[in-house]
Amino acid sequence: MSSKLALERMPLQVLGTGSALPGPPLTTEMLLARVSPYLTPGNVSLARRLARRLAIGSRHLSRSLAQPVEGTRPEDSGPRLAARASRKALAGARFDSDAVDFLLGHTATPHTLLPSNTAWTADELGFGGPHLELRQACTGFAAAALTAAGLLRSGAQVVAVVGSETGSVFFDPRQAAQDTGQLVNLVQMGDGAGAVLLGPLESPSASRIELIFYGSSGLGRAPALSLVDGGSGSPRVGDSGVPHFNHQFQDIRAHGFELLRTALRAAASAGIDARTIDWFIPHQVNGRLPELCAAHLGLPGERVVCEADALGNLGSAAIWVTLDRLRNSKRLAPNARVLVLGAEASKFLYGGFLYVHGAS
């Protein structure tokens, strides 16, 4: 069966962006000091080597790691992070939540299975309008942007999109001796939320998303990242009493750039010439993205934006957080073109969009 690509060419104005990170940055050594009582010395050494290999020096976590199993700090729950990021996006647009017609959320680590994470976010924002949640990780941004385009086509004027992740609560250090993937999760992942406000394009010189693309190459393939405990296919949680991510990191390592390469080809097929791009934002999987994208994708490494060295892999929040930080970094010249390339190993999804920075 041939694969199909979803394409949206209607330009969407970016009215504002925002991001939120829980607590101060936690360096790898600080992180390992907190969890070392639950790890073997061999695990600690391996975790340190993994962090160096991934070039991730720090991250922000929504939990305190005072216990081997715990929830988020109350102030850093998924919905509260999402609400903080959304408020920053609203402030950048000089709007309040009443201006929003529809709230879209996406996450792989919801506050509760029901109600949705976005329902809790709406409560935090005091937003009484319609909302929708997508259960996705690293390509949730592309699916949400496509959905937002459909809503704007149907008459909405302002759609808020927010991606959030609090995956640290799924780490149980006591399982690390039996599951190396747990150590990878520990040193690679971070928590946070990123938001964007989208509307119909009102000026050709405004900041905008000009093209969105989204596809899958996962038909019939086993997932490389899954959270199955608690679902109808596996209702029993693990031995620790909490579900945890099954992370086939070797498969992701082997096939991750295949997905980004597919995303780059999809962008080219939609008419985007990589030679016209000023900056590239690939999914923020590790701190060596510039050199890896140069080696695997032929992209100019000096123009690859990488925040993973300081933030870790933020999953569903990564793209919006990185775009927000780039917009606030003053590195974007007027009319700068930014190509976003997303890849998700859960069932091998890819997607992205072209962002054009406003002229003023």
Image (cartoon, grey):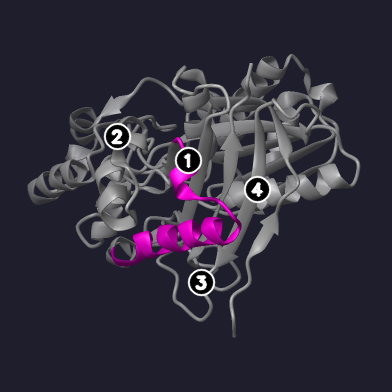
Q: Which mark is residue 211?
A: 4
Q: Amino acid at mark 1?
A: Ile
Looking at the image, tell me whether mark 4 or mark 1 is earlier in sequence order: 4
Specify whether residue 8 is in view. Answer: yes
Find numbered disc 4 in the image and state the secondary structure of the residue it sits on.
strand
Residue ID for mark 2: 309
- Image location (x, y in percent) of residue 163: 59, 40
At x 71%, y 18%, the residue is: 93
Q: Nearer the viewer, mark 2 or mark 1?
A: 1
Looking at the image, tell me whether mark 2 or mark 1 is earlier in sequence order: 1
Quarter in which the C terminus is drawn:
top right
User: Which residue appears farthest toward the bottom when viewing the image?
Assistant: 1
Q: Amino acid at mark 4?
A: Leu
At x 58%, y 25%, the residue is: 18
Q: Is residue 248 left or right of residue 53?
A: right
Residue 270 is one of the magenta-drawn residues: yes
Camera-side residue of 276 and 160: 276
How far apart, in angstroms, are the residues tagged by discs 2 and 1? Answer: 23 Å
User: How busy is the neighbourhood of tag 1: few (under 14 within 10 Å), some, or many (20 plus)?
Assistant: some
Q: Give the extent of the magenta segment.
A: 254-278
Q: Amino acid at mark 2?
A: Asp
- Image location (x, y in percent) of residue 90: 70, 21
At x 70%, y 51%, the residue is: 146
Residue ID for mark 1: 277
Camera-side residue of 126 and 294: 294
Q: Which mark is residue 217?
A: 3
Q: Amino acid at mark 3?
A: Ser
**Which SS type dominates the magenta stretch?**
helix
Q: Nearer the viewer, mark 4 or mark 3?
A: 4
How far apart, in angstroms, are the residues tagged by discs 4 and 3? Answer: 20 Å
Specify whether residue 114 is in view. Answer: no
